[in-house]
Image (spheres, rainbow, N blue to C red):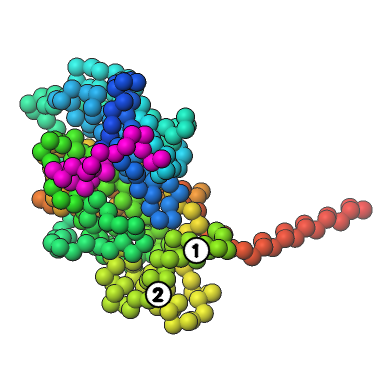
Amino acid sequence: MATLIRPPPLDPKQSVIENVLELTQLSDIDPDLFTNTRPLWHPPGARGIYGGAAIAQTLSAAQKTVPPDFTVHSMHCYFVLAGNADIPIIYHVERVRSGKSFATRTVQARQRGKVIFTTTMSFVKQNSGGRELVEHAYPMPNVPSPTEGLDDLDVGGGGRSPFQSQRLPIENDDSPHPHTKKCRQWMKARGSISSAGGHEAHLSAIAYMSDSYFVGTIARAHKLWRYSTARQSKSASTADEDVLKKLLAMDDAELKRMKFVDEADIAHIRRLRNGEDVSKTAPREIGMMVSLDHTIYFHNPRSFRADEWMFTEMETSWAGDGRGLVYQRMYTREGVLIASCVQEGLVRLRQSDEPKPEPKPEPKPEPKL
């Protein structure tokens, strides 16, 4: 059972993302308990539900417990366990503090009594900073505008995403230094977010979208191969293998229209399609890549619409010890910085099957006479 209560009919006045993120308040049990109204998406090949849904729904739950003149300015999240799309999620909001200018909320997402996701967020009262302010913002780069009507195709997806995405070429993609590269894209929620949703709906929507291929920036910066053909069982192929089959059937022109396929991917796919021996030229392959934590700092939280084009820029400052760190900036089309995000993820390479050479024993010292 994917929901605790039978979902109501879709509200035609709401956008797709509003329906996806809808919550049901379990007020008869506890006014601070909520559950997902509709089934959550499990991306093909992922360990669990799409992480952005947990981020956005915990924010939606917390927003229902603060006064209307308080707005979220930061949230710090941890992915604890993979969420099961076939089991309802219970969100418990703890009202840690409600002050004159700031309010703090902690939200835990649980399945079968276990915490799968936890976040602490802070809300600030509108216009509490005073009339004279210290202000600056990291400027948005000069990039090509989005193309109306064009949407990146998700070859391995199960249906349309609640938001649109248009990826741009990787900045400095030929650099040997991963930290100098920038992964960029335009995105927006599909349709129009309803006026009844208020600013809360737009904030939840960008929280949902902020997890879009976030930690994947590390794989793109290092040109790692992301479409494994390793089977987990002899009877079923992996989702990545199904994606690879579709990519191999495309010519170069079709591949270039797949914005999530980078030039390094196309070069390797071309060699595979031509039957070349790629044992020596194959890029290193991702073995496991999942998000560990996710932080969002919201700026100008009531001055944007998530159903209008927004620009995001991601870069990675460090990777090592099986983990990697990525930074993201989100802007309106007019160049207003609306969010800064940080995510650390688990990034493990598929290890070689070749046995490691046995260490040679150190020569014993000759006895002194």
In the image, residue 28 lies in the stretch drawn in magenta: no
Q: Position of residue 30 (x, y in %)?
A: 33, 20
Residue marked by disc 2:
248
> What distance separates the C-alpha of mark 2 from that of mark 1?
16 Å
Left or right of 332 on screen, residue 174: right
In the image, residue 2 lies in the stretch drawn in magenta: yes
Question: Label 1 amino acid?
Answer: Ser
Question: Label 2 amino acid?
Answer: Leu
Q: At 22% from the left edge and 23% from the top edge, which residue is drawn?
A: 66
Q: Nearer the viewer, residue 319 or 98?
A: 98
238 is higher (above) or lower (below) than 321: below
Q: Tell me the SS state at disc 1.
A: loop
Left or right of 313 on screen, residue 319: right
Label placed on residue 247:
none
Mark nearer the N terminus (2 vs 1) = 1
Q: At 25% from the left edge and 18% from the top edge, which residue is drawn?
A: 98
Q: Position of residue 101 (x, y in %)?
A: 19, 20
- Give the magenta part as a residue range: 1-21
Label placed on residue 237:
1
Q: Nearer the viewer, residue 87 or 355?
A: 87
77 is higher (above) or lower (below) than 152: above
Task: Tell me the mark number nearer the camera, choosing from 2 and 1.
Answer: 1
- Dominant SS of magenta comes to loop
